[in-house]
Amino acid sequence: MKSLSVFLLTCLTALLFGCNPIPEIEPGEKPADPESYGELIGTFFVENRNMTLQLYDITDLYKEVCYVSWAVPVNHTRYENLPNELKETVKTYGLMSPTQVYKMKWKGETVYHLFCAVMDDWTGVYKPSGERITFKTIQEYYQFLKEVTDVNCLLLIDTEVVKSAEGAPNLLVGTWQMDWEHLHHDITPNNSGIDDQVALYDDLPFSITEVCHFEANGTGYLRSVKSFKNGKTEVALDPFSYWLTDYQTYNSVSNYQGYSYVCCFAAGDTIEYTARSYDTFGKTFDRGFTFVTYPWYKQKSDPYSNKKGEPKYGVPERDNSSLIVGRWSGVGFSAAGVFGKRSYTWVFRSDGTGYELLGRKIYQSFAYTVEGNNDALQLTIYKYDTGFYTQDGFWKEGDWTYSYVPQPTPKGKVMKARIYDNGKSLELEGFNNTRADLSQTPIVFQRQ
């Protein structure tokens, strides 16, 4: 049971067909990842995960934050000034997930409460000596929360993977195809899983197939084919330069291999992607750690090589007939749940497709429809090239269990939006800044 953790998280990855050649990018020309901020606590190698992580102190961003469900002041205490007996525990928490450290009084004694997304909240209460305080029942823990006083936030830790692709084999080289039909589910670390044919968004008048081709010299292309049920097709062809930014393996446990890589598209976009595989990239890769995915399948050649198209991975021009068309960026800042700054980018193209970024990293590609006027828009987002979850219609929840839906009927996600300030500002349902008292204000996305 993790009711409070769930609550906090709720409050709370060419030389082609008439196109000009793309020059390979020298290392010094590669744009840096702009997402890092805060004061570095330390860099640590985590052996059981085979990765190096950095812990950042981001506490100075705040004067007050939300503890459980109420606002408390920040009394910034740096990691090195914590009680010596607690430092190792705090570091262990931080290396698992972003961590919060609180100090308070309970029954006349000083205690510390640690929050971490992958740990149960009631297991994170400690004495200054480092001894953990245990609760026999969840009711005892809730009573503890009612009795604590003088709560202060001492430390907020953000966790970042140190990326490196030095010496990595480039197993991306080749041709890969993803469509809205071939589904892989019940994936486990030993690469067992089931391939099905399940039409994604069969209620739409079209489906989308994409082909991604990687050359060993750091160039490639992305071809997107939108096939309508009336036989019409729309094709886009986007050459890019790319380089690997990270390579991970867990060979002691499984056949897992994973890359992060950056694409600089000829039309102007720069996007970082992930590619994960449990079969050493022999057959498939997908974008994330999910049990349901429409993966990329390896092909001997591009089956759509005869289809030409213009590039579309650039900033869409303003369309006065549909003001949602464009590139929109905003920054989220939360004092509750997941702490820190998060930059978001939404791109809506005039062809009814687009994508969402977290920082420069792809979160999802999508098709979309829009209805209503600019003051009261209704968007329907049909996501793809990402993971699918319970709320997407692929899983059903039982008594402490989840199971795959035998005949899923995935639907798009409806969200409200409004555009104002002469078409320069956008608000999207579900994208809010959260204050320490849990009140919210919308993130304002600005047209780029």
Image (cartoon, helix red, strand yellow):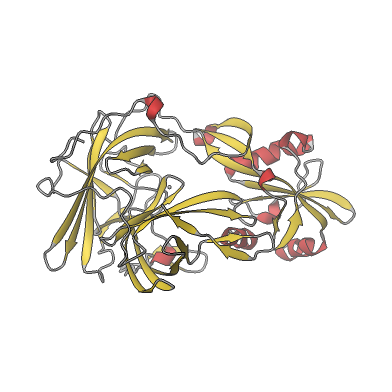
Do we see residue 305 in this rendering?
Answer: yes
Q: Residue at x 51, y 68 (%)?
A: 399
Do we see residue 185 in this rendering?
Answer: no
Q: Quadrant of residue 279?
A: top left
- Left or right of 233? Residue 317 is right
Outermost residue toward the right?
A: 108
Total marks placed: 0
Q: Nearer the viewer, residue 99 or 448?
A: 448
Outermost residue toward the front?
A: 422
Q: Residue at x 26, y 50 (%)?
A: 312
Locate the N terminus by quadrant.
bottom right
Q: Which percent across, then down, holds residue 317? A: 31, 55
- Left or right of 196? Residue 19 is left
Q: Residue at x 52, y 65 (%)?
A: 400
Q: Which percent across, then down, holds residue 390? A: 43, 64
- Left or right of 425? Residue 66 is right
Q: Which percent across, then down, holds residue 77? A: 76, 41
- Left or right of 258? Residue 163 is right
Q: Which percent across, then down, holds residue 83? A: 79, 38
Q: Quadrant of residue 366?
A: bottom left
Outermost residue toward the left?
A: 306
Q: Residue at x 23, y 51 (%)?
A: 210
Q: Nearer the viewer, residue 143 or 24?
A: 24
Q: Quadrant of residue 292?
A: bottom left
